[in-house]
Amino acid sequence: MKNLLLISLILSISITMFSCSDDDAAMPEPDPPTLVQAAQSANLSILLDAVGAVDGMANALLQAENITVFAPTNAAFESALSAFSANNLAELVEAIGGVENLEIVLGYHVLPQVFFASDIPEGSTEVQTLANQIVTINRSGNQVTLTDAVGNTFAVTTADVTIENGVVHVINGVLLPELEIETTARLLIQEHPDFGNIFTDHDGKTLYYFANDVDGSNNCTGGCANNWPIFYAAAENLEIEDPDFDIDLFGSIETDAGMQSTYNGWPLYYFANDNEPGDVNGDGANNIWYVAKPDYDLMVANGQLTGNNGTNYIVNEAGEYVEGNGNTRYFVDFGGNTLYAFANDAFNESNFGGSEDVWARFRAVVNVVPSIMDLNDFGIIANEQVSFRGNPLYFFGSDESRGDTKGVSVPNPGVWPVVNDGTVALTPQEEG
């Protein structure tokens, strides 16, 4: 996806420009250096490396007539590296979209005419650069700054360095033109101090699952989508080597906002209020948003309960299943299969004697759960069945699709309730 580059590297530094004294003017002038020689003398090594990375650009600048070059210092380039989370020039070039965009950036620092300090009028002057984009030169007395296409303002720190074919002004920032950048997102697994292995993007931003998406589709629309933007990474860009990750569980769906990546059928999202890598501010939001992990044993669903009879149900304040429309929170396994309790069971004891083709015991190792759940509520009972708060857990054989809740009406509502954080704990019966 191509986006307009917006980056803020605003530095407010103004210094007095250098000019020649009368005594200096009286002395014989040596031949002016070339642009490359001037950059070497000023130790602008990263600028020289950047120019050298664009085939033919150095020769083109050396052979051009009447140019003004705004030359960023090494410190300016290092600030740009940091802003783009790049460790070196090669990573910066990749971050801004390749060598073609680097050429545009460098061309944005060159004017096809000569502007000495004395040539710059007071106030603001818009000037066309070799990149065919406008840069604004601002002069107030002996202070000169430049404002680029995205609003960054930088200062001239050394003015009027004469070169063979023009003049160089050293500046303390990298000017940015408008660029179209195709960002290649990648999915990563990173260790979080509170959540263990979590999914992040290539910049370390946390990703999330939405309980309403138990059916495998994106159900976050309207205002929801503003707070929870979708995440997408192409499968060919995956380089995950982690035992918890199964490439066969990685997929994608098409949404109104574009393609969205999924893991084990759960679409992946960002949270708008996460500002820094490692932030997990979205976890537990409304008890339906959870940090995305590759190794959950259980998940939370949130949706309409619809029985095997086609009737919609809600759970009233008394805990009774009554006809009605509205979402109910309930637990599922990581694949989206609904978990039920049986009203006739006792504490950690299954009293269901029917076929497991109809009501299968839930057997699993439960070690990793969303933050709404407490691992201490789970146990293993007879026949390796998992229990929750003393309630043995089951699947319903007629649930065919992710998030199905057909069991809630069988044989009557309330006999096989879904399980959630409001499920009442069974207690051991006292022996009489």
Image (tube, rainbow, N blue to C red):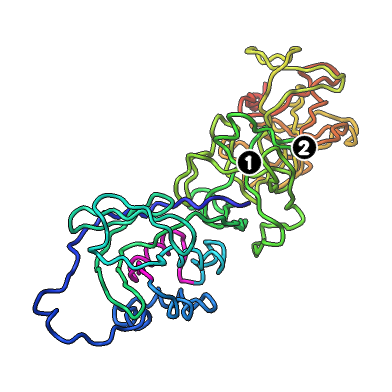
**Other residues around mark 1 within 10 Å, as few (<14) / some (14–19) / many (≥20):** many
- For mark 1, give the secondary structure: strand
In the figure, 360 relative to 9: above or below?
Answer: above
Rendered residue at 63%/51% (across/down)? 1
Q: Nearer the viewer, residue 280 or 230?
A: 230
Q: Is residue 123 left or right of residue 6?
A: left
Q: Which mark is residue 337?
A: 2
Q: Give the amino acid type for the residue marked by disc 2 in the picture.
A: Asn
Q: Would you name the residue on which mark 1 appears?
A: 209
Q: Is residue 337 magenta?
A: no
* Residue 298 figure quarter: top right
Asked whether residue 110 is in view, the answer is no
In the figure, 1 relative to 328: above or below?
Answer: below
Rendered residue at 67%/61% (across/down)? 238
Task: Tell me which label, 2 or 1, sits earlier in the chain.
Answer: 1
Q: Which residues are magenta?
A: 67-89
Q: How many marks?
A: 2
**Other residues around mark 2 within 10 Å, as few (<14) / some (14–19) / many (≥20):** many
In the figure, 19 relative to 318: above or below?
Answer: below
- For mark 2, give the secondary structure: loop
Q: Nearer the viewer, residue 271 or 142?
A: 142
Q: Is residue 387 left or right of residue 181?
A: right
